[in-house]
Image (spheres, grey):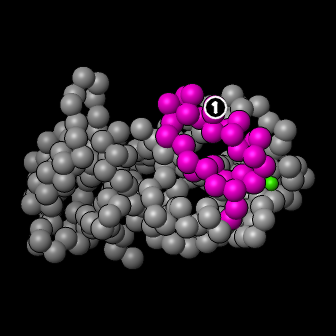
Amino acid sequence: MKKILVVEDEEDINSLIREHLSGSGFEVESVYGGDDALEKAEEKDFDLIVLDILLPGLDGWEVCQQLRRSQRTRNIPIVFLSALSREPDRIRGFDLGGDDYIVKPFSPRELVSRVKAILKRVNGKIVDKKSVSIGDLKVDFLKHQVYVGGKPAYLTSSEFKILHVLISNEDRVFTRDELLDAIGEEGQILEYGNIDVHVHHLRQKIERDPKNPKYIKTVWGVGYRFASSK
Ligand code: CA
């Protein structure tokens, strides 16, 4: 279940959004101010944040900037929701790293479908490249083949999918849940633990020293990321 944090100081709007999102199958938590939003985002993993701009205390701009600065929260999609409808405000929202900007008054149903669209886009974003070479690793996406130091490594389909998602989004941290979504096929029973097993095998196959991985890094308490060699 995807978890969404709603940050909105107006009680009515806050509960309206909460109702619509939970009615659509999301797990929703809500807060009424900027400081609480940052606190919540640090203590729990959210898949997306709906963020009002005019808030008591820290405003939405500042909250967004701080979220983008922390490694733990910098990749969480943010949907701004604001009565500030002028073009410069909307542009500022995107410049600060917002993923969408919805102007009040708004349709709750549209908000839900925009949220769904963003989550779909974010999950397993795949680059449109034929191959990628990083260090001694080469991934040929067309042939589904991986080479380590010029020698082929034989990956299972799930291992390949995990590597594909991670390498396509260098440095972005993926939660186990997101990786499950990326490799999941209908009818398959998948558990968190499966991801760790796949990653373990993947490291055996592509890392020179699997115990001290250079490519696939564990982000404690969050998930995994592909380390850029830069
Ligand atoms: Ca407000």
Residue 130 image offset from top left, x and y in percent? 35, 47
Q: Is mark 1 within 8 Å of ligand 1?
A: no
Residue 175 included in the magenta stretch of the image: no
Q: Who's the residue at 71% across and 36% down the image?
A: 16
Query: Which amino acid is tagged 1?
Result: His
Quarter the N terminus occupies: top left
Closest to the observer, 153 or 20? 20
Q: Who's the residue at 30% across and 68% down the image?
A: 220
Q: Which quarter holds ligand 1?
A: bottom right
Residue 146 is left or right of residue 35, and the answer is left
Q: Which residue is mark 1?
A: 20
Q: Who's the residue at 56% across and 48% down the image?
A: 29
Residue 224 image offset from top left, x and y in percent? 31, 60
Q: Who's the residue at 37% across and 55% down the image?
A: 174
Residue 6 included in the magenta stretch of the image: yes
Residue 140 image offset from top left, x and y in percent? 26, 49
Closest to the observer, 37 or 138? 37
For residue 208, above or below residue 126: below
Residue 43 is left or right of residue 225, and the answer is right
Residue 128 visible, this angle = no
Residue 23 visible, this angle = yes
Place residue 110 in its image quadrant.
top right
Residue bounds of the magenta highlight: 5-34
Residue 218 image offset from top left, x and y in percent? 27, 66
For residue 212, above or below residue 222: below
Residue 202 is left or right of residue 67, and the answer is left
Residue found farthest to the right: 86
